[in-house]
Image (spheres, helix red, strand yellow):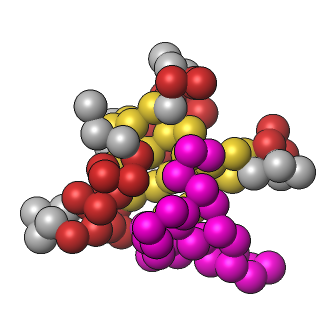
């Protein structure tokens, strides 16, 4: 199983994937339910953390805070802390590829 960091590197650097189709849910203390979401265009990968661009500025998020990663609306990574809850956390993003949505 790939770590969140290795999986994101694959999505960012392998020409078969489009980082714009990736969303990341992460632990964000103080945010509603202590988590936030970022989309591919707002994310930069660094060796020990990812940088998320928000309206309030940039945030450095350590990779261990990533809860769920989706690509094209499908859960592709779940942190073991939230195992089995990826589709619940991602919510409507997992329904985006379903007919009628």
Q: Residue at x 30, y 50 (%)?
A: 7
Q: Is residue 6 left or right of residue 47?
A: left
**Which portion, as a residue range, is magenta?**
40-65
Coordinates of residue 81 in the picture (x, y in percent)? 59, 24
For residue 78, which quarter of the picture?
top left
Q: Residue furthest right?
A: 30
Task: Looking at this view, name the residue that lies furthest to the left.
Answer: 16
- Asked if residue 12 is positioned above or below residue 92 in the image, the reply reads below
Q: Position of residue 19 (x, y in %)?
A: 32, 67
Q: Nearer the viewer, residue 6 or 75?
A: 6
Residue found 28% across the figure and 39% down from its top: 2
Quadrant in which the C terminus is drawn: top left
- Residue 5 drawn at (x, y percent): 39, 53
Spot occupied by residue 28 in the image (x, y as percentages of width and height) = 75, 51
Picture quarter with the N terminus: top left
Which residue of the protein is positioned furthest toward the top in this rendering?
Answer: 84
Residue ID at (46%, 55%): 23
Q: Is residue 78 above or below residue 26?
A: above
Residue 8 lies in the magenta stretch: no
């Amino acid at each position: 199983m790939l770590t969140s960091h290795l999986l994101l590197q694959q999505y960012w650097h392998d020409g078969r994937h489009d980082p714009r189709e990736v969303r990341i849910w992460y632990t964000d203390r103080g945010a509603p339910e202590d988590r936030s979401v970022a989309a591919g265009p707002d994310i930069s990968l660094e060796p020990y953390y990812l940088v998320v661009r928000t309206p309030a500025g940039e945030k450095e998020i350590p990779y261990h805070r990533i809860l769920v990663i989706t690509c094209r609306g499908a859960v592709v990574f779940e942190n073991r802390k939230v195992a089995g809850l990826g589709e619940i956390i991602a919510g409507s993003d997992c329904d985006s590829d379903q007919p009628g949505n």
